[in-house]
Image (cartoon, rainbow, N blue to C red):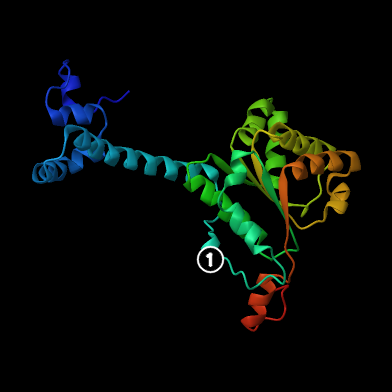
């Protein structure tokens, strides 16, 4: 443990106000104390009001550090927001449902969202944007691509750390699972996916994106029974949001004059 205050090294309790604030790690308050004291003298505020202003600066600084930590821990591939989403691109999108979800009330009930639509209509953007809103509100959040989560769980089973790995995906209040359906899973992967969804059922929220309709999930998980069990748990407490349209990336390439998307 690193002892920062000089008084600690001298072997006695801090005596001066500056030493005490340093000892208690009240760095934001220490920096702003002179201005706050001057303001308090001019306004003749009460002791209670002074203490409130003094601590509010420290609380705000600590909350901001926690928010930045939440965002970093979420592991978003990119920071996306609803403000930067192109609502005019999809041919069909339930905008009001998504904006209502941005209030994050679904987190209080451990509910979720399932974005279904073809590639390139903005599902990942919207899922990340909602995840970023949650993390920015202090909610413990984790983003993962479906294939990365399954590969991690399979590897952890091999090195006998499966319980710890499962906890990584079951513990966050919000889990964002992206790109379900782009690659199929074998039985082991399907079982792991089911265990994650089951462990979070009615306990934590899931925001999931997929390019496959539910009727095709048996092909993703190679087992209609497992697929049905996963869908049942997801849909029971989730808002299913269907988005239709062409790929934004293809549209963007055409706009720039590129017609061969295989380049």
Task: Classify the position of the N terminus by image quarter.
Answer: top left
- The residue drawn where x is 72% and y is 41% is 150
Q: Is residue 130 above or below residue 28?
A: below
Instruction: Name the one closer to the observer, 52 or 263.
Output: 52
Residue 94 image-quadrant placement: bottom right
Outermost residue, top side? 11
Outermost residue, bottom side? 257
Q: In the displayed structure, does residue 237 sit left or right of residue 175?
A: right
Q: Is residue 25 above or below residue 184?
A: above
Q: Is residue 133 above or below residue 228?
A: below
Q: Position of residue 74 (x, y in %)?
A: 54, 44
- The residue drawn where x is 76% and y is 35% is 192
Outermost residue, right side? 224
Q: Position of residue 199 (x, y in %)?
A: 71, 31
Q: Position of residue 208 (x, y in %)?
A: 69, 49
- Disc 1 on helix, strand or loop? helix
Q: In the displayed structure, does residue 156 sit left or right of residue 21?
A: right
Instruction: Name the one closer to the observer, 61 or 262.
Output: 61
Instruction: Name the one closer to the observer, 100 or 252.
Output: 100
- The residue drawn where x is 55% and y is 46% is 75
Residue 31 image-quadrant placement: top left
Q: Which residue is mark 1?
A: 84
Mark 1 closeness class: few <14, some 14–19, many ≥20 residues within 10 Å: few
Q: Position of residue 87 (x, y in %)?
A: 61, 69
- The residue drawn where x is 64% and y is 41% is 205
Query: What is the tally of numbered marks visible in this picture?
Result: 1
């Amino acid at each position: 443990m690193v002892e920062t205050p000089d008084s600690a090294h001298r072997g006695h309790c801090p005596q001066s106000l500056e030493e005490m604030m340093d000892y208690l790690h009240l760095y934001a308050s220490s920096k702003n104390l002179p201005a706050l004291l001057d303001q308090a003298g001019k306004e003749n505020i009460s002791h209670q009001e002074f203490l409130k202003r003094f601590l509010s600066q420290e609380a705000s600084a600590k909350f901001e550090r926690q928010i930045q930590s939440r965002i970093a821990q979420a592991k978003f591939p990119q920071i996306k927001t609803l403000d930067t989403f192109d609502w005019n691109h999809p041919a069909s999108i339930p905008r009001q449902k998504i904006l209502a979800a941005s209030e994050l009330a679904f987190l209080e009930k451990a509910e979720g969202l399932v974005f279904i639509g073809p590639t390139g209509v903005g599902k990942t953007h919207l899922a990340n944007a909602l995840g970023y809103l949650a993390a920015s509100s202090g909610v413990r959040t984790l983003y993962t691509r479906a294939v990365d989560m399954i590969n991690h769980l399979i590897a952890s089973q091999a090195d006998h750390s499966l319980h710890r790995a499962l906890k990584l995906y079951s513990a966050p209040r919000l889990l964002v699972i992206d790109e379900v359906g782009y690659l199929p899973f074998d039985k082991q992967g399907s079982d792991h996916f089911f265990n994650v969804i089951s462990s979070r059922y009615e306990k934590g929220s899931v925001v999931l994106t997929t390019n496959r309709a539910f009727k095709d999930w048996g092909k993703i998980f190679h087992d209609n029974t497992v697929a049905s069990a996963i869908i049942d748990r997801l849909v029971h407490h989730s808002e299913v949001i269907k988005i239709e349209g062409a790929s934004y990336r293809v549209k963007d390439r055409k706009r720039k004059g590129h017609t061969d998307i295989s380049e």
